Amino acid sequence: MTERLYYRDCFLREFDARVVRVQPADAGRARVWLDQTAFYPTSGGQPNDLGTLEGVPVEDVFDEGGEVVHLLQRAPGTERVHGVIDWPRRFDHMQQHTDQHVLSAAFERLFNVPTVSFHLGRDLCTIDLATRSLGRRQAEGAEDLANQVLFEDRPVQIRFPTEAELAQAGLRRPPEETGEVRVIEIEDFDRCPCGGTHVARTGQIGLILCRGVEKVKQGVRVEFVCGGRALRAARSDFARLSEAARLLTTGARELPDIIRKQFDERRAAERQRQQLFEQLAAYEARALLAEAETLGDRRLVVRLLPDADSSYLRLLAARLVKEPGVQVLLANRAQPAALVFAQTPGLPADMNTLLREVLQQHGGKGGGSRDFAQGALPDSAHAEPALSTAAHCLRNLG
């Protein structure tokens, strides 16, 4: 069994060890076992450490059969090796993982909501909570309590209680393994079994920021950052707000009001635009019907409208088929080109079948109902031939 030096000293940055076994891996790499290690292997939602062994880069560290395996770029050349931990990465993980303990304990203390899983990502961390819903004020309340614990700079201690002590420890969750149990204790706030790396005092975490709350299958997921990540996130947010304010020629504080005003103006403009489109469609429908081809008791409208967008084609088609006995074939020259086939309900054609047959010949995809179907052609050069094909079918319908 590998002696895990980080179990008792998470701040150990360098160590010496003896190589127990070396096994070749792909691309000239090597799997290396040591008698002791300060490298943390991926587990419990926390990624592995990186660094070097005797100057050789360590690419991965993982558990295998109760032992720690180090994946190196190549095999070390000596039996005795000196290990160096990538300290910025390690300390970041220590901050995020200890923060998770604090934040999970805050949610449980305030709302009796337990944490069911934790993930330490490259940019964000998440905890999944066993609850159906979580309000904004609840998230802010837990964030406030967690930050209070950070500001108080409480000690974070590693303990290995006896079985009797463990029974009286008041753990936030029961241990998953039997035998010696490692407990992380945050003074007068949280006790939790954990094999990860943690800071020595809560003040070393810096600041906690909850970044988002979303509903997931197993409950509610809370995104958060702390320490250096919180600083980078706040700096990035401020830069984005400042740039948005500059583009809108206002101050950051006035930005929400300006955006709200522009949104309202845009919504009003969109309503006006829709009204104008409807008026234009009514006018254009009358002109197209006056030029429509007569096929017995049917009138056929076939038109390529190069600059019309797909929403206007649908609006125009819907306006045309309000009239009795009308069949409509419309397209534009957009990329992709839009097709709209429609008819007054009760006419004999099946516009969905017709559209699919045309698309099969000319490429593209789409569908709809018997009386109204729409699709798209990846090559706008096929729009006019597609209309001709469809018109030929309707003319031969009888």
Image: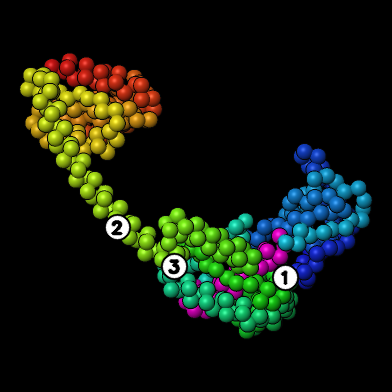
Residue 57 appears in view: yes
Disc on the earlier residue, 1 or 2:
1
State the image quarter where residue 84 is shown.
bottom right
Name the dominant secondary structure of the magenta segment. Answer: helix
Kind of residue at badge 1 = Gly
Residue 88 location in percent, x, y? 72, 61
Residue 285, placed above or below residue 296: below
Q: Nearer the viewer, residue 322 or 184?
A: 322
Disc on the earlier residue, 3 or 2:
3
Disc on the earlier residue, 1 or 3:
1
The quarter in which the N terminus is drawn is: bottom right
Q: Residue at x 25, y 53 (%)?
A: 268
The residue stretch that appears in magenta: 89-113
In front: label 1 or label 3: 3
Inspect the magenta stretch and tell me whether residue 95 lies in it. Answer: yes
Residue 205 location in percent, x, y? 65, 72
